[in-house]
Amino acid sequence: MYYFITNREDLLTSAIELAQVKRMHIFDKLGIESRVVTMQYNWAHQQVEQKLGTTNRVINLFQYYQRLPYKHTEDDQQLVKRVLQPSRFDIKDNIAYRDGKKRIQVNLNNGRLYYVDYVDRFGFSDRRDFYDNGCLTYSEFFEDRARVVMRQYYDYQGKVKILYHFRGGENNAPVLTLIQLFDHGQELQFDSEASLQAYFLDELASTDPQAVMISDRSDVALQSFAEMKSNVPRYQVFHSAITTDGQSAGKLFSVYEPIKEMLQNHQLNGLISATKREARDASKRFATTASYAIPVTYISEEQLNKEIPFNKRQPGQLIAIARLSHVKRLDHLINTVILLKKKHPAVDLKIYGYDDEYNNYATSNELKKIVQRHNASDYIHFCGYQHDLTDVYEHAQIEVLTSSFEGFAMALLEAQSHACPAVSYDINYGPADIIEDGISGRLIPDGDTHYLYVVLDKLLSNKDLLMSYSKHAQQAASKYSMKNVVKQWQQFLKDEHLPL
């Protein structure tokens, strides 16, 4: 079995988790069993798995030990009534009162019981019980500063299975000090989540003599790999640049610093990058020959052969598929579009991607302020996350990418597969592998906003040139057909002498 490791699958699914699903399809094509392994708790697991098509193919650390009998009903009204029926309580609007004071409050999410707060006679929150598909899944206990001191996860019998201990830290933030796992009739103790995760991965490996583990989230899996006891093949996939500036000689992200030593100590067997250029850079930085280039996605033959009439595209429609974060440099594009509007009245920009929470949404707020200052909200739109972008790609005239660096630039490939011309800064890594410059789109000097304006101005003024790029876009994307990507995985498995 091949295990693809991440933190969790979210409804706002990131490119990394989407890449895992694509890889599962590739392994299915090869007749090789695979599972996604998630390390964090996720209340939305049922909806996400249905959305991604991974039902019964995800192994979650907490679900693995809890084994709860989920009840897939439409609502939890009967359960709510049981929670709110202690003696001598007055019930009103899902709140239980004693002597006029709130003591129990039920909180719902789309009709399902989410969590229940228990309040003491002084008004302090004492405990919060969380429910998952009709099952009590874990409880948090608080001290008088509303800081969590303990979290206990329950098994299918209602017994404590996993116990997290916290102590007070700086700025009133709880610090994890101990984890207890009650398993196989014994109590196990761990000082960190990485140690618990290593034990969990060792358990998976102990029941599977052909286990191979592929980490898609280095911050989740690398330390766990280092602490594992079992000797199973382990690989790290790079979904973004390995350096802080995206340059081959740049400073490594701190999470990648242990990789060289892990390779030497056989705690890691190899590395997988999305592009040949990054695979070469990784080989040099980490002193290994086990550095492979395999695309993180593929395009179906059906999509590559789909006919998409150019006249379906909205004149002047530009799109950007990017989260609102500093590394995407969307201010370059926004300011360029504001200038283009003076010459091209039909120009319109739609940005698809969720807000980055970093630094209290600083980048998102600044981008929106730029639009407000220039009264541009009627032609520059923040459209949020959208799972299916088919119509977006097929109605746009140009997709634009202005990132500082990428791991692959999956959105560019998706745009090209939908016959959408693309314009991108020529950065590490991905755009030069995807766009055929001057044939299916344009590559422009990194960070050159003047040239960005010149190129977009020329394309918006030349329908025939846009039509030519559109005509050749799917051909440019064909190198990433499922057939071609399957071959690259086959070669990797052969080179690493892994189970087929």
Image: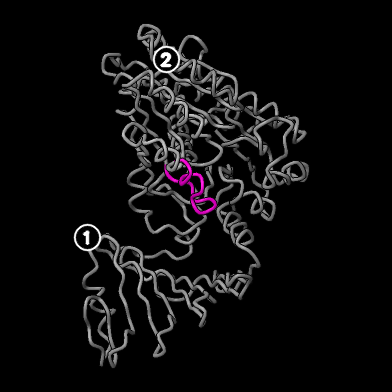
Instruction: Say if 278 sits above or below 50 in the image.
Output: above
Q: Residue at x 66, y 67 (%)?
A: 191
Q: Could you say where residue 467 lies in the image, as x and y percent from the top left?
A: 36, 10
Q: Nearer the viewer, residue 495 or 9?
A: 9
Q: Nearer the viewer, residue 35 or 30?
A: 35
Instruction: Say if 147 sits above or below 367 in the image.
Output: below
Q: Does residue 85 appear left or right of residue 31 in this picture?
A: left
Q: Nearer the viewer, residue 435 or 320?
A: 320
The Cα atoms of the two marked residues, 2 and 1, are separated by 45 Å
Q: Could you say where residue 96 lies in the image, as x and y percent from the top left?
A: 27, 83
| Magenta stretch prevailing secondary structure | helix
- Write down the region rendered in magenta: 354-367
Whether pointer 2 and pointer 1 mark residues with C-beta atoms closer than 8 Å, the reply is: no
Callout 1: helix, strand or loop?
A: loop
As for residue 142 lying within the magenta part, the answer is no
Q: Amino acid at mark 1?
A: Glu
The answer, for residue 302, to whether it is visible in the render is no
Instruction: Say if 209 sits above or below 390 in the image.
Output: below
Q: Does residue 213 appear left or right of residue 471 in this picture?
A: right
Q: Disc 2 marks which residue?
A: 473
Quarter holding residue 228: bottom right
Q: Could you say where residue 242 lies in the image, as x and y percent from the top left?
A: 66, 37
Disc 1 packing (10 Å; few <14; some 14–19; many ≥20): few
Q: Disc 1 marks which residue?
A: 74
